[in-house]
Amino acid sequence: RKEVEQDPGPFNVPEGATVAFNCTYSNSASQSFFWYRQDCRKEPKLLMSVYSSGNEDGRFTAQLNRASQYISLLIRDSKLSDSATYLCVVKANDYKLSFGAGTTVTVRA
Amino acid sequence: EAGVTQFPSHSVIEKGQTVTLRCDPISGHDNLYWYRRVMGKEIKFLLHFVKESKQDESGMPNNRFLAERTGGTYSTLKVQPAELEDSGVYFCASSRAPAGVREQFFGPGTRLTVL
């Protein structure tokens, strides 16, 4: 079983739409959770950390459900610049990041 | 602040040859990590250095891979001899200490193709 499973998409949405997707993780001892963004042929960059109480960063909202081992990301009012691959990332110990395969989002004009 | 840099950006070699990838972390970052993404798969952890010491190399695929970080600055990852399945993108990342609470910053990656 993969450590982190994601719906690969693609999600193809118009500008201004809301898009949401999620991932599940297998290690119940995981301590930290993140969403990274990766543009085509670029490096992954941290989008936001995910906290148990849920958190927002502008148009982005992340939720964590530890009981179900489930993490979600919601993007409101999508912009063309939001087109990217979104990586669900889990840290089980102090340093080792476990990545999902990514969810592709394309925002069209 | 300069980011993590990696060299080369692309490498095409034949099966059986040797390739050495280099990573220069952000200045002052004691922690250095190597990850790789093979075709169609997720990014996977290879190993972690704290300064010049290997803390965890549990993700290294086999003994054809050798990572070093002499002097605790830049790191090299050597693949010898390269096999077809080694093709992929090799990412380096770095972070300040302590590793547990610090963001890992990724370099642009080296795209390795083994023919």
Image (spheres, rainbow, N blue to C red):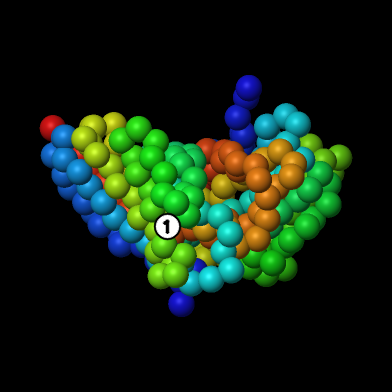
Give above or below for B72 relative to A8: above
Give above or below for B34 relative to A1: above
User: What residue is pinned by disc 1?
Assistant: A64
Give above or below for A58 relative to B55: above
Q: Nearer the viewer, residue B30 or B60?
A: B30
Which residue is painted at 64% across and 51% down in the image?
B34
Provide the chain ID for the residue under circle 1. A
Q: Is residue A40 visible?
A: no
Q: Nearer the viewer, residue B11 or A86?
A: A86
Q: Position of residue A83 (x, y in %)?
A: 28, 39
Question: Would residue B61 appear left or right of A84 to someone viewing this image?
Answer: right
Question: Would residue B18 appear left or right of A41 to someone viewing this image?
Answer: right
Label 1 CA crowd tier, 10 Å (few <14, some 14–19, many 20+)? many
Q: Position of residue A47 (x, y in %)?
A: 44, 40
Quarter of the image where the C terminus of chain A is located = top left
Question: Would residue A101 appear left or right of B63 to someone viewing this image?
Answer: left
Which residue is painted at 66% across and 64% down in the image?
B60
Q: In the displayed image of the protein, which residue is found farthest to the bottom?
A: A1
Q: Quadrant of residue A56 in the image?
A: top left
Question: Would residue A106 appear left or right of B100 to someone viewing this image?
Answer: left
Q: Position of residue A34 (x, y in %)?
A: 48, 50
Q: Nearer the viewer, residue B38 or B113?
A: B38
Q: Position of residue A57 (x, y in %)?
A: 39, 36
How many marks overall?
1
